[in-house]
Image: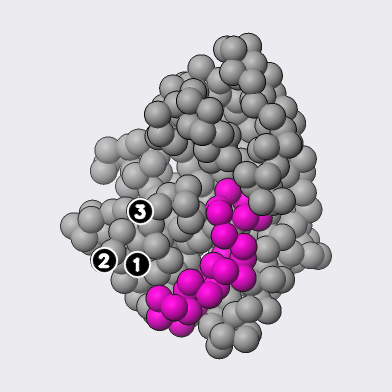
Amino acid sequence: MIDLHTHSTCSDGSERPGRVVELASAAGCSALALTDHDGLAGIAEARRRAGELGIELIAGCEVSCRFEVGSMHMLCYFVEDTGSVLAAELGRLRDDRDVRNERLLDRLAGLGITLCGAELAEEAGGGVIGRPHFAALLVRHGHASSSEDAFERLLGKGGAAYVAKARLEPAGAIALVADSGGTSAVAHPLSLGLDPTALGRVLGELSAAGLTGVECYYGRYDPGTRAELVALARRHGLVPTGGSDFHGRYKPDLAVGSGTGDLQVPDDVIPELAARRRPARPGRNPSRAGG
C-alpha cells in the first residue's frame, strides 16, 4: 500500500508532517508522498520520521494551476525543498497566499464577519494558513453550518468572499517540475468539471506538454470511476497515480492509505513515475496568473 497525496500542518492539514508519516506506518503503507500546497517545508521532518519507521518518503507538493472551469491542481513528485527552480517559485506562491489571506479577511469583514488573525494562526498550528482554517473558524463562530457550507457560500470559487490566488499555467507548471528533476500528475481530475470527452482532450494536451500522470486512484472515487480513469490515463500514455488526499480533521472521511476505506494504490506506481524523471536543469520561469 502506498499513498501519494497527503497534507500536513505545513499547508492545510491538521497533523504535523511526522504524524502523517506515523499514520501511514500504522496503516501499513510502504511509501508516502507529502504533498502540501505550494510548499516543501514539511519534507525534512517527514523524511526524518520516515527513516525511523522504515517508510519510503517521496518529497512532493500540490500547486494550483490556472483553468477556466472547475479547479486544476498539479501534484509534483521527487522535488526537493532547496536548490530547484520549483522551490523558488513556491516561495513566490506562498508570499501571494499571505496577501490573499489578508484580502479574504477584508472580504469577510465587508460581509459583517470578523475573524481574528491570531485565532487563524492558532487553528493552523503554526503552519501555513489556508481556507480550511477559515472554514473551521466560520463554523466555530456560527457563520456556517459546516466546512462544506462555508466553502459553498463564502470561501469557494463563486462564494461571496472568494479571493483568487496566483496560479501557474498548467504547461508552465509541468515544465517547472521537470526542470527540477520531478514528475507531475493532475490531482483529482473530476474536479476539472469536464465531461469524459473534454477530460480526455485536456489530458491529451497536457501529456503532449510533458505531464507524467493523473490521479486515478483518488480517496473519494468509487472503484468504477477509478477503473475508467486508469483506462483514460493509459490511452494518453500517463501513469495512473493515487492517494487519499488526507487533511486530518479538515477532511475527516479520508484516512491515510485507505481514503474512505477501500483505496488501494498499486506499489508499482512509484517506479513507473521514477522512470520518467530527467536530470534537473535550469528551466524557464512559468507564467503566473490569477484565477
The residue sitting at 62% across, 62% down in the picture is 16
Q: Is residue 232 visible?
A: no
**First-in-chain label (1 vs 3):** 3
Residue 120 can be seen in this image: yes
Residue sitting at the far left: 224
How far is disc 2 from disc 3 in space, using C-alphas? 12 Å
- As for residue 20 lying within the magenta part, the answer is yes
231 relative position to 218: left or right: left
Q: Determine the CA span between mark 1 and mark 2.
A: 6 Å
Mark 2 surroundings: few (<14), some (14-19) or many (≥20) residues within 10 A: few
Residue at x 64%, y 47% (from the top left corner) = 124
Report the residue at 39% width, 39% height from top.
Answer: 192
Residue 252 rendering spot, x and y as whole percentages = 40, 52
The residue singled out by tag 3 in the image is 253
**Vertical side of 132 occupied by 74: above or below:** below
Does residue 148 appear left or right of residue 39 in this picture? left
Tell me which segment is drawn in magenta: 9-34
Label 2: which residue? 262
**Three-letter code for the amino acid on which mark 2 is drawn:** Asp
Q: Where, quadrant-wise, is the C terminus in this rendering?
A: top right
Q: Position of residue 274 (x, y in %)?
A: 53, 76
Which residue is labeled 1 in the image? 258
Give whichever of discs 2 and 3 has the lower sequence position.
Answer: 3
Q: With 27 as the anchor, is 185 left or right in this view?
A: right
> Residue 88: image x %, image y %?
78, 53
Identify the amino acid type marked 1: Ser
- Element class at badge 2: loop
Confirm or deny contact between disc 1 and disc 2 (CB under 8 A): yes
Give the residue type that dot 3 points to. Asp
Say which element carries label 1: loop
